[in-house]
Image (cartoon, rainbow, N blue to C red):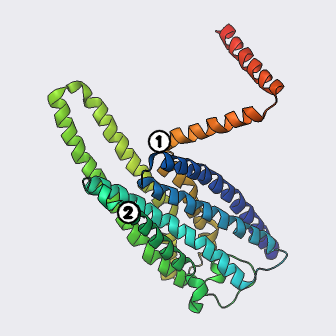
Amino acid sequence: MRNVFSVMNIVVFGWILSFGSMLIISTNLLVAISLVLLIRRRGIQSWCFVLNLSLADILVGLAITKLAYDNLRSIHSPVVKNDCLLRMAFVISPTAASILTMFLISLDRYVAIKLPLRYNHLSGKGRTAGALALLWALSITVGFLPCMVKQMQKGEYYGICTFFSVIEPKSIIVIFCGAFFPVLCVFLYFYLDILKIACGHQRQIQQVCEAASRASQPSRYWSHVKALRTVAVLVGCFTLCWCPFFVVSVVQVLCSTCELYHFLENHLWLLGLTNSLVNPLVYACWQKEVQEQICMLFVCIKSKMLCLMPLSTIIMEILSCHIKSFCTLSDV
């Protein structure tokens, strides 16, 4: 009976991963195409980091797709240990790249506000390319570390490819937590300092506006509240998605009698992966330029589809629109 439930859990977990990977890939692909068109049109270097974030999250979705396929296939044919290690490496590497890219985005915004006069010099094409190359080198090293170090591999492997079934849990958890919590602390420091600078700018703007005209004071207060909300969402989404996984991982390492591995890889790891779905919405779609580019992309796709449609179908569409508009006017 326990084997039946374990097989059912593997199947359900595989289908959840499949559905999540489709959402992650489609959402990030749309944002990535819009960012490529936007960078080609305007050439702003800071959007390269957001584009790299979307590309890393697309790779996360592709790796999850393969992992879901392996989970569903392992019911009938077990996965070889080396293949499972490669699957996990291709999941860990883009996930680490996604987290580190968010760190680069926060660093880029911090430098832009903290050192506005030197920002253009510090954010050139060479420095941007070098930062991205170093980021991917570090991410690939972390991802393929279990494949290269035998001590990080689990001794007993039963053919079912999951995170903690092939990798020694404590070793990888110590490495992850040792990298995650310092990045999170610096990440929070950047945004809190940005908020502090924004508050100082707000007070200066408010004093100038009070001297010039008191009528503009409410809009300045509203922009301050909006900036505060944006910072809270940016920091909060990242923390809520990944912090539970790493906090429970620390508890698992410190508590030798606890058995939290199943809860970690079947629930909290999925929560962390949802950050790859939230990233394009928070970091890209909230930017007005990207929103306009996505709308232009949809308009272009719609026009192409209309060109491919038969003439009779187009006439029927126009007639139906006129009938709907006439019905709404008659109701009024």
Please tell me the numbered disc located at residue 247: none
Query: Which type of secondary structure does the marked residue at label 2 adopt?
Result: helix
- Judge left or right: residue 98 versus residue 70: left
Farthest residue toward the left?
Answer: 211
x and y, in percent, of residue 199 in the image: 25, 46
Q: Amino acid at mark 2?
A: Phe
x and y, in percent, of residue 266 in the image: 64, 68
- Judge left or right: residue 142 versus residue 70: left
Residue under label 2: 187
Residue under label 1: 289
Number of labels in the image equals 2
Callout 2 crowding tier (Cα within 10 Å): few <14, some 14–19, many ≥20: many
Q: Amino acid at mark 1?
A: Glu
x and y, in percent, of residue 143 in the image: 56, 77
Query: Which type of secondary structure does the marked residue at label 1 adopt?
Result: helix
Mark 2 vs 1, N-terminal side: 2
Closer to us: 95 or 123: 123
- Judge left or right: residue 48 versus residue 167: left
Indicate the quadrant where residue 73 lies. bottom right
